[in-house]
Amino acid sequence: MQKPSIPKGTRDFSPVEMAKRNYIFNTIRDVYHLYGYQQIETPAMENLSTLMGKYGEEGDKLLFKILNSGDFLSGVTDDELTERNTARLASILCEKGLRYDLTVPFARYVVQHRNEISFPFKRYQIQPVWRADRPQKGRYREFYQCDGDVVGSDSLMNEVELIQIMDEVFRRFGIRVAIKMNNRKILTGIAEIIGEAEKIVDITVAIDKLDKIGLEKVNEELRLKGLSEQAIEQLQPIILLSGTNQEKVASLKTILAASETGVKGVEELQYILEKIDKTPLQAELELDLTLARGLNYYTGAIFEVKALDIQIGSITGGGRYDNLTGVFGMPGVSGVGISFGADRIFDVLNQLELYPENALLTTQLLFVNFGEKEQDWLLPIIKQVRMAGIRTELYPEAVKMKKQMSYANTKNIPYVAIVGEEELEKQQINFKNMLSGEQHTLSVTELIEYFSGKDFVTGE
């Protein structure tokens, strides 16, 4: 018989992995709550009319489509079947698809519920998304996104808060990070003043590679894209801009003086930096002119978070966008948001071994089972122990002691409670620390007290 398997690009998560993932999700959730964000969820599947055409042609190909239920061939003619036009057939056979990201469903949610929502609307969403991509290392067909967005407010205080949220989340994780920031308007301004406004995408794609391929290669790529030598010459001092954030802002004011859009971008950055100065961050906040992100999507500030102690792509990103809901007929809703890369954060925490031991919420105490009589005495006691918040199990069968102890070892349960005939007679519990081997005889009250304020893993 063939061994069962799962689809390529998907994963099973063991109890230990789930404990780690929940630690990540709960940390992010707690910080979002601190800043007044509220959680929403949207269905795994959306109408294809909601999803199609929102991610470009490539994105449309990567949408998982769901066959209509029942006789899905009923609306198809024989000619259409023999023609084998996949895209046309899919549009007849499939009305629904799995969501590709959380942003488009969020836009749909805002438009559909606009009369119940009070703006500004601060929402977060932690759910899986699906992409029919070619699976490879670090790229999956099913993965989680942890998005936080504020819509219906143009205030740059939202950007300030999102930077604080990113800083606080990584402070709690113990990951040293740099938060990189730029502004789409500055990039537009740069392209304008060097006389290459229509080549903004080519310019940003090239300078985005500066730290990977170096200045010579960047300039070579710009030439290949048809930029004039004069424009490339004018770009050099901008690409190589150095100094503190404030020094960069001062230089940009001069360089971009002739571009109204560019000046506006510099003013926005300056405002954010001034506000952040009033409540300093633990992370380093760096103005990075080579940061571009998804350019046709963002319209203002853009962010990216890089881990400092490990080589990995960006672990969080986001920015300001102007017209989230326009595609659904509700124009003019500005928003700003970030998305934490849970899978990459998982890898970073694993490699740097930063999971707190008590985040793995394993059982703390196992009661050995000696038989019916002991079991009956233990049941109300175990209830009492659980009511005190101690994660407790009773081994379900009265099997050999060795087997029960081996179960405790396999599950990394740090404490075992033994109640045999002798203990039953004295109404006491023989309590064993599985790490040190120490044993004590305790009453139920003493047992509960022993756990209060303990580090249950080390017993300290």
Image: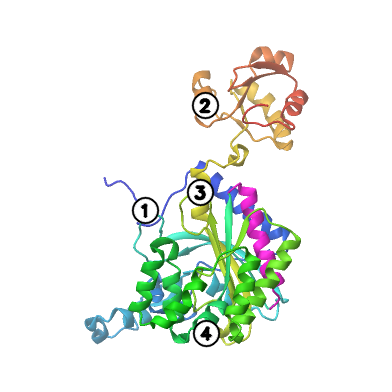
Give the residue at mark 1: 6
Question: Mark 2 and mark 4: span between their CA atoms?
Answer: 68 Å
Q: Which amino acid, mark 3? A: Val
The answer to whether marks 3 and 2 mark residues whose Cβ atoms lie closer than 8 Å is no
Q: Which amino acid, mark 2? A: Asn
Instruction: Specify which label sits upstream in the sequence, 4 or 1.
Output: 1
Q: Is residue 134 left or right of residue 51?
A: left
Q: Which residues, given as a range, are shown in magenta?
A: 154-175
Residue 140, given in percent of the width and then of the height, sits at 41, 58
Give the residue at mark 2: 409
Give the residue at mark 3: 348
Tag 2: Cα neighbours inside 10 Å, few (<14), some, or many (≥20)?
some
> Is label 3 or label 2 in front?
3
Tag 4: Cα neighbours inside 10 Å, few (<14), some, or many (≥20)?
some
Q: Which amino acid, mark 4? A: Ile
Tag 3: Cα neighbours inside 10 Å, few (<14), some, or many (≥20)?
many
Instruction: Specify which label sits upstream in the sequence, 3 or 2.
Output: 3
> Is label 4 or label 1 in front?
4
Q: Is residue 209 above or below residue 284?
A: below
Q: Camera-side residue: 446 or 288?
A: 288
Q: Which amino acid, mark 1? A: Ile
Question: Mark 4 and mark 3: span between their CA atoms?
Answer: 40 Å
Asked if the stretch drawn in magenta spans residue 166, the answer is: yes
Residue 338, given in percent of the width and then of the height, sits at 59, 66
Q: Is residue 443 above or below residue 328?
A: above
Residue 65, given in percent of the width and then of the height, sits at 40, 72
Question: Mark 3 and mark 1: span between their CA atoms?
Answer: 25 Å
Which residue sits at x=66%, y=26%?
A: 459
User: In the rendered view of the protein, which quadrant contains the C terminus?
Assistant: top right
